Image (cartoon, rainbow, N blue to C red):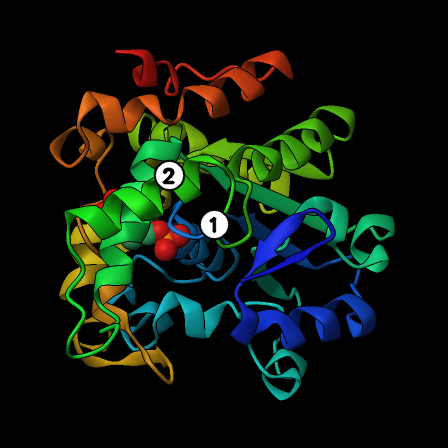
Protein backbone atom coordinates (compact mmCIF):
# COMPACT_ATOMS: atom_id res chain seq x y z
CA UNK A 1 0.00 0.00 0.00
CA UNK A 2 1.00 3.63 -0.48
CA UNK A 3 0.46 6.46 2.00
CA UNK A 4 -0.87 9.58 0.27
CA UNK A 5 -2.47 12.73 1.74
CA UNK A 6 -2.88 11.02 5.11
CA UNK A 7 -4.53 7.79 3.87
CA UNK A 8 -3.50 4.35 2.63
CA UNK A 9 -4.10 3.25 -0.95
CA UNK A 10 -3.68 -0.10 -2.66
CA UNK A 11 -0.79 0.41 -5.04
CA UNK A 12 -2.58 -1.18 -8.03
CA UNK A 13 -5.37 1.43 -7.73
CA UNK A 14 -3.19 4.47 -7.06
CA UNK A 15 -2.73 5.71 -10.62
CA UNK A 16 -6.49 5.65 -11.17
CA UNK A 17 -7.04 7.65 -7.98
CA UNK A 18 -4.58 10.35 -9.06
CA UNK A 19 -6.25 10.57 -12.44
CA UNK A 20 -9.71 10.82 -10.79
CA UNK A 21 -8.41 13.59 -8.51
CA UNK A 22 -6.98 15.64 -11.35
CA UNK A 23 -9.50 15.13 -14.14
CA UNK A 24 -12.97 14.37 -12.76
CA UNK A 25 -15.53 17.14 -13.33
CA UNK A 26 -18.66 16.79 -11.23
CA UNK A 27 -22.10 17.82 -12.51
CA UNK A 28 -24.61 19.49 -10.17
CA UNK A 29 -26.95 16.54 -10.66
CA UNK A 30 -24.36 13.85 -9.82
CA UNK A 31 -24.90 11.51 -6.88
CA UNK A 32 -21.80 10.13 -5.22
CA UNK A 33 -21.72 7.22 -2.82
CA UNK A 34 -18.70 7.36 -0.53
CA UNK A 35 -17.63 4.51 1.72
CA UNK A 36 -14.81 2.44 3.06
CA UNK A 37 -14.51 -1.02 1.51
CA UNK A 38 -16.79 -3.65 3.10
CA UNK A 39 -19.15 -1.18 4.77
CA UNK A 40 -22.14 -1.86 2.50
CA UNK A 41 -21.07 -0.23 -0.79
CA UNK A 42 -22.74 -2.90 -2.94
CA UNK A 43 -26.03 -2.64 -1.04
CA UNK A 44 -26.08 1.16 -1.23
CA UNK A 45 -25.22 1.07 -4.93
CA UNK A 46 -28.23 -1.15 -5.56
CA UNK A 47 -30.52 1.04 -3.44
CA UNK A 48 -29.39 4.30 -5.04
CA UNK A 49 -29.76 2.84 -8.51
CA UNK A 50 -33.22 1.48 -7.71
CA UNK A 51 -34.41 4.79 -6.20
CA UNK A 52 -33.34 6.76 -9.25
CA UNK A 53 -34.55 4.11 -11.75
CA UNK A 54 -37.86 3.05 -10.26
CA UNK A 55 -40.33 3.58 -13.11
CA UNK A 56 -42.63 0.56 -13.32
CA UNK A 57 -40.58 -1.23 -10.70
CA UNK A 58 -43.62 -3.09 -9.35
CA UNK A 59 -44.80 -4.25 -12.76
CA UNK A 60 -41.40 -5.08 -14.18
CA UNK A 61 -39.57 -6.21 -11.11
CA UNK A 62 -37.94 -9.14 -12.90
CA UNK A 63 -36.90 -6.93 -15.83
CA UNK A 64 -35.10 -4.40 -13.67
CA UNK A 65 -31.41 -3.92 -14.69
CA UNK A 66 -30.37 -5.18 -11.24
CA UNK A 67 -31.44 -8.64 -12.43
CA UNK A 68 -28.87 -8.70 -15.19
CA UNK A 69 -26.11 -6.41 -13.92
CA UNK A 70 -24.18 -6.37 -10.67
CA UNK A 71 -24.61 -3.08 -8.71
CA UNK A 72 -20.94 -2.30 -9.35
CA UNK A 73 -21.56 -2.38 -13.10
CA UNK A 74 -24.50 0.00 -12.74
CA UNK A 75 -22.73 2.43 -10.43
CA UNK A 76 -19.05 2.79 -11.43
CA UNK A 77 -16.29 3.28 -8.90
CA UNK A 78 -14.39 6.54 -9.52
CA UNK A 79 -10.67 5.93 -9.56
CA UNK A 80 -11.13 2.27 -10.46
CA UNK A 81 -13.31 2.12 -13.55
CA UNK A 82 -11.93 3.39 -16.88
CA UNK A 83 -12.74 6.97 -18.06
CA UNK A 84 -14.68 5.44 -21.02
CA UNK A 85 -17.04 3.70 -18.58
CA UNK A 86 -17.48 6.91 -16.60
CA UNK A 87 -18.22 8.89 -19.79
CA UNK A 88 -21.13 6.56 -20.67
CA UNK A 89 -23.05 6.98 -17.41
CA UNK A 90 -26.48 8.55 -18.07
CA UNK A 91 -27.71 11.60 -16.13
CA UNK A 92 -28.35 11.83 -13.21
CA UNK A 93 -24.96 10.16 -12.91
CA UNK A 94 -24.46 7.72 -10.06
CA UNK A 95 -20.90 7.09 -8.95
CA UNK A 96 -19.08 5.69 -5.96
CA UNK A 97 -15.69 6.22 -4.40
CA UNK A 98 -13.59 5.06 -1.45
CA UNK A 99 -11.48 8.23 -1.55
CA UNK A 100 -11.58 10.25 1.72
CA UNK A 101 -13.40 13.60 1.72
CA UNK A 102 -10.23 15.70 1.95
CA UNK A 103 -8.83 14.09 -1.20
CA UNK A 104 -11.94 14.40 -3.38
CA UNK A 105 -11.60 16.52 -6.53
CA UNK A 106 -12.54 20.18 -5.95
CA UNK A 107 -15.43 20.03 -8.42
CA UNK A 108 -17.21 17.50 -6.19
CA UNK A 109 -16.88 19.83 -3.22
CA UNK A 110 -17.86 23.02 -5.01
CA UNK A 111 -20.66 21.72 -7.25
CA UNK A 112 -24.17 20.95 -6.03
CA UNK A 113 -23.70 17.21 -6.41
CA UNK A 114 -24.81 15.15 -3.42
CA UNK A 115 -22.78 12.70 -1.39
CA UNK A 116 -24.18 9.71 0.49
CA UNK A 117 -21.73 8.23 2.97
CA UNK A 118 -22.18 4.84 4.61
CA UNK A 119 -20.16 3.67 7.58
CA UNK A 120 -20.12 0.43 9.55
CA UNK A 121 -18.89 -0.86 12.87
CA UNK A 122 -15.10 -1.21 12.34
CA UNK A 123 -15.02 -4.74 13.77
CA UNK A 124 -17.67 -6.04 11.38
CA UNK A 125 -15.94 -4.14 8.58
CA UNK A 126 -12.65 -5.79 9.48
CA UNK A 127 -14.21 -9.28 9.59
CA UNK A 128 -15.91 -8.67 6.27
CA UNK A 129 -12.70 -7.49 4.66
CA UNK A 130 -10.78 -10.46 6.06
CA UNK A 131 -13.25 -12.87 4.45
CA UNK A 132 -13.09 -10.91 1.23
CA UNK A 133 -9.31 -11.10 1.30
CA UNK A 134 -9.50 -14.90 1.64
CA UNK A 135 -10.83 -15.20 -1.89
CA UNK A 136 -7.53 -14.02 -3.33
CA UNK A 137 -5.08 -16.85 -3.19
CA UNK A 138 -1.91 -15.27 -1.90
CA UNK A 139 0.12 -18.08 -3.37
CA UNK A 140 -0.34 -21.79 -3.55
CA UNK A 141 2.08 -22.26 -0.62
CA UNK A 142 0.70 -19.53 1.66
CA UNK A 143 -2.59 -20.39 3.29
CA UNK A 144 -4.18 -17.55 5.30
CA UNK A 145 -4.21 -18.62 8.96
CA UNK A 146 -5.07 -17.22 12.39
CA UNK A 147 -1.64 -15.61 12.70
CA UNK A 148 -2.05 -13.79 9.43
CA UNK A 149 -5.50 -12.66 10.50
CA UNK A 150 -4.08 -11.19 13.73
CA UNK A 151 -1.35 -9.42 11.82
CA UNK A 152 -3.93 -7.91 9.48
CA UNK A 153 -6.15 -6.99 12.44
CA UNK A 154 -3.35 -5.11 14.23
CA UNK A 155 -2.57 -3.17 11.08
CA UNK A 156 -6.25 -2.42 10.43
CA UNK A 157 -6.86 -1.23 13.99
CA UNK A 158 -3.83 1.07 13.74
CA UNK A 159 -5.19 2.62 10.58
CA UNK A 160 -3.17 0.72 7.99
CA UNK A 161 -5.95 -0.58 5.74
CA UNK A 162 -7.14 0.25 2.22
CA UNK A 163 -8.38 3.89 2.32
CA UNK A 164 -7.77 3.90 6.08
CA UNK A 165 -7.32 5.00 8.81
CA UNK A 166 -10.92 3.83 9.20
CA UNK A 167 -11.75 6.34 11.96
CA UNK A 168 -10.35 9.34 10.07
CA UNK A 169 -12.24 8.38 6.92
CA UNK A 170 -15.49 8.25 8.91
CA UNK A 171 -14.78 11.50 10.76
CA UNK A 172 -14.06 13.50 7.63
CA UNK A 173 -17.42 12.64 6.03
CA UNK A 174 -19.29 12.85 9.35
CA UNK A 175 -17.97 16.39 10.01
CA UNK A 176 -18.89 17.46 6.50
CA UNK A 177 -22.41 16.03 6.91
CA UNK A 178 -22.87 18.21 9.99
CA UNK A 179 -21.50 21.37 8.39
CA UNK A 180 -23.29 20.79 5.12
CA UNK A 181 -26.32 18.53 5.64
CA UNK A 182 -27.86 19.25 2.25
CA UNK A 183 -24.63 18.12 0.58
CA UNK A 184 -23.62 15.04 2.61
CA UNK A 185 -25.96 12.42 4.06
CA UNK A 186 -24.28 10.25 6.67
CA UNK A 187 -25.71 6.73 7.06
CA UNK A 188 -24.85 3.74 9.18
CA UNK A 189 -25.09 0.20 7.77
CA UNK A 190 -26.60 -0.99 11.07
CA UNK A 191 -29.27 1.74 11.02
CA UNK A 192 -30.24 0.75 7.51
CA UNK A 193 -30.54 -2.88 8.57
CA UNK A 194 -32.67 -1.95 11.57
CA UNK A 195 -35.05 0.55 9.96
CA UNK A 196 -34.73 0.08 6.22
CA UNK A 197 -38.01 1.71 5.23
CA UNK A 198 -37.47 4.94 7.15
CA UNK A 199 -33.92 5.15 5.83
CA UNK A 200 -34.94 4.57 2.22
CA UNK A 201 -37.56 7.31 2.43
CA UNK A 202 -35.01 9.72 3.90
CA UNK A 203 -32.43 8.75 1.31
CA UNK A 204 -34.82 9.37 -1.58
CA UNK A 205 -35.77 12.79 -0.15
CA UNK A 206 -32.13 13.75 0.25
CA UNK A 207 -31.41 12.77 -3.35
CA UNK A 208 -34.28 14.89 -4.64
CA UNK A 209 -36.30 11.82 -5.69
CA UNK A 210 -38.91 11.70 -2.88
CA UNK A 211 -41.48 8.90 -2.78
CA UNK A 212 -45.12 9.87 -3.22
CA UNK A 213 -47.66 8.74 -0.61
CA UNK A 214 -48.65 5.88 -2.95
CA UNK A 215 -45.07 4.83 -3.48
CA UNK A 216 -44.48 4.73 0.27
CA UNK A 217 -47.10 1.96 0.42
CA UNK A 218 -45.59 -0.32 -2.20
CA UNK A 219 -42.54 0.86 -4.16
CA UNK A 220 -40.40 1.31 -1.06
CA UNK A 221 -40.97 -2.33 -0.10
CA UNK A 222 -40.35 -3.46 -3.69
CA UNK A 223 -36.99 -1.70 -3.72
CA UNK A 224 -35.99 -3.12 -0.36
CA UNK A 225 -36.88 -6.61 -1.51
CA UNK A 226 -35.14 -6.22 -4.85
CA UNK A 227 -31.96 -5.02 -3.11
CA UNK A 228 -31.99 -7.45 -0.19
CA UNK A 229 -28.88 -9.56 0.17
CA UNK A 230 -30.99 -12.72 -0.09
CA UNK A 231 -32.41 -11.63 -3.42
CA UNK A 232 -29.22 -10.21 -4.96
CA UNK A 233 -27.21 -13.25 -3.89
CA UNK A 234 -29.54 -15.61 -5.76
CA UNK A 235 -29.40 -13.74 -9.07
CA UNK A 236 -27.48 -15.55 -11.78
CA UNK A 237 -25.37 -12.47 -12.57
CA UNK A 238 -24.22 -12.29 -8.96
CA UNK A 239 -23.59 -16.01 -8.65
CA UNK A 240 -21.39 -16.34 -11.70
CA UNK A 241 -20.22 -12.97 -13.09
CA UNK A 242 -17.20 -10.79 -12.43
CA UNK A 243 -17.45 -7.02 -12.02
CA UNK A 244 -13.70 -6.43 -12.26
CA UNK A 245 -11.24 -8.71 -14.08
CA UNK A 246 -10.26 -10.64 -10.96
CA UNK A 247 -13.21 -9.97 -8.66
CA UNK A 248 -16.04 -12.49 -8.67
CA UNK A 249 -19.47 -11.09 -7.89
CA UNK A 250 -20.36 -13.93 -5.52
CA UNK A 251 -17.82 -12.75 -2.94
CA UNK A 252 -19.61 -9.42 -2.60
CA UNK A 253 -22.49 -11.11 -0.79
CA UNK A 254 -21.56 -12.98 2.37
CA UNK A 255 -23.80 -12.79 5.46
CA UNK A 256 -24.79 -9.12 5.66
CA UNK A 257 -25.31 -9.32 9.42
CA UNK A 258 -24.72 -6.90 12.26
CA UNK A 259 -22.30 -8.04 14.99
CA UNK A 260 -20.84 -11.03 13.13
CA UNK A 261 -17.43 -10.07 14.55
CA UNK A 262 -18.21 -11.94 17.78
CA UNK A 263 -18.08 -15.19 15.79
CA UNK A 264 -14.57 -14.49 14.55
CA UNK A 265 -12.66 -12.33 17.03
CA UNK A 266 -11.62 -12.98 20.61
CA UNK A 267 -12.18 -10.22 23.21
CA UNK A 268 -8.45 -9.43 23.15
CA UNK A 269 -8.52 -9.06 19.38
CA UNK A 270 -11.53 -6.75 19.68
CA UNK A 271 -9.67 -4.70 22.30
CA UNK A 272 -7.18 -3.66 19.65
CA UNK A 273 -9.91 -1.38 18.34
CA UNK A 274 -10.31 0.54 21.62
CA UNK A 275 -7.98 3.30 20.50
CA UNK A 276 -9.94 3.75 17.29
CA UNK A 277 -13.15 4.03 19.25
CA UNK A 278 -11.47 6.49 21.60
CA UNK A 279 -10.43 8.65 18.65
CA UNK A 280 -13.99 8.70 17.35
CA UNK A 281 -15.34 9.58 20.78
CA UNK A 282 -12.82 12.37 21.31
CA UNK A 283 -13.85 13.91 18.01
CA UNK A 284 -17.47 13.96 19.22
CA UNK A 285 -18.66 11.07 17.07
CA UNK A 286 -20.97 8.64 18.77
CA UNK A 287 -22.85 5.69 17.41
CA UNK A 288 -25.05 3.35 19.34
CA UNK A 289 -23.77 0.60 17.08
CA UNK A 290 -20.12 1.19 17.98
CA UNK A 291 -20.67 0.76 21.74
CA UNK A 292 -20.70 -2.94 20.96
CA UNK A 293 -16.90 -2.68 20.96
CA UNK A 294 -16.80 -2.26 24.71
CA UNK A 295 -18.87 -5.36 25.46
P1 LIG B 1 -20.36 -9.30 5.36
O1 LIG B 1 -19.02 -9.73 4.84
O2 LIG B 1 -20.31 -8.90 6.79
O3 LIG B 1 -21.43 -10.27 5.08
P2 LIG B 1 -19.09 -3.84 0.37
O4 LIG B 1 -20.24 -3.91 -0.55
O5 LIG B 1 -18.74 -2.45 0.82
O6 LIG B 1 -17.92 -4.59 -0.17
O7 LIG B 1 -19.55 -4.55 1.73
C1 LIG B 1 -19.70 -5.94 1.77
C2 LIG B 1 -20.56 -6.30 2.96
O8 LIG B 1 -21.91 -5.92 2.69
C3 LIG B 1 -20.57 -7.80 3.18
O9 LIG B 1 -20.77 -7.97 4.58
C4 LIG B 1 -21.79 -8.23 2.38
O10 LIG B 1 -22.30 -9.48 2.73
C5 LIG B 1 -22.74 -7.09 2.71
N1 LIG B 1 -23.81 -6.92 1.72
C6 LIG B 1 -23.74 -7.08 0.38
N2 LIG B 1 -24.94 -6.87 -0.19
C7 LIG B 1 -25.78 -6.57 0.81
C8 LIG B 1 -27.19 -6.28 0.85
N3 LIG B 1 -27.92 -6.25 -0.25
N4 LIG B 1 -27.74 -6.02 2.06
C9 LIG B 1 -27.00 -6.04 3.19
N5 LIG B 1 -25.68 -6.33 3.21
C10 LIG B 1 -25.07 -6.58 2.04
Q: Is residue 218 left or right of residue 232?
A: right
Picture residue at 29% right of the left edge, 61% below the top: 133
Q: Quadrant of the C terminus?
A: top left
Ligand 1 closer than 8 Å to label 1 CB: no
On the image, the x and y values in percent for residue 57 come to 35, 60
Neighbours of disc 1 within 10 Å: few (<14), some (14-19), many (20+): many
Residue placed most toward the observer, 51 or 17: 17
Q: Is residue 145 left or right of residue 189?
A: left
Residue 135 image position (x, y, % from top left): 22, 67
Q: Is residue 8 above or below residue 196?
A: below
Q: Report the side of 270 relative to 17 (left or right).
A: left
The local secondary structure at tag 2 comes to helix
Quick check: can you spot residue 146?
Answer: yes
Marker disc for residue 161: 1
Question: Percent from the top left, x then y, of residue 77?
Answer: 54, 67
Query: In terms of depth relative to the viewer, which is nearer, 293 or 140?
Result: 140
Query: Tag on residue 154?
Result: 2
Mark 2 C-beta closer than 8 Å to ligand 1: no
Number of marks in picture: 2
Report the residue that reaches farthest toward the bottom. 84
The nearer-to-camera label among 1 and 2 is 2
Answer with mark 1 or mark 2, whichever residue precedes in sequence.
2
Q: Do callouts 1 and 2 mark residues in contact (Cβ within 8 Å)?
A: no
Mark 1 residue element: loop
Q: Position of residue 93 (x, y in %)?
A: 64, 66
Q: Please, is residue 80 above or below residue 169 in the view?
A: below
Residue 225 visible (yes or no): no
Q: Residue at x 63, y 78 (%)?
A: 86
Q: Residue at (49%, 40%) from the top-left corner?
A: 118
Amino acid sequence: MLFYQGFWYLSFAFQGIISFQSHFEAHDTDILLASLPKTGTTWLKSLLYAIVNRENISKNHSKHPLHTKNPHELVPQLGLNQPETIAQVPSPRLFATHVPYSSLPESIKTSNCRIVYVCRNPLDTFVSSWHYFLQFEISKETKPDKEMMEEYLIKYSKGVSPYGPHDEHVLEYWKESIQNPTKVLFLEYEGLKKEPKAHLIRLAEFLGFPFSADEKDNVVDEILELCSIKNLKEMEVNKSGQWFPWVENKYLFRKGEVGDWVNHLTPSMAKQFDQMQENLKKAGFSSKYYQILKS
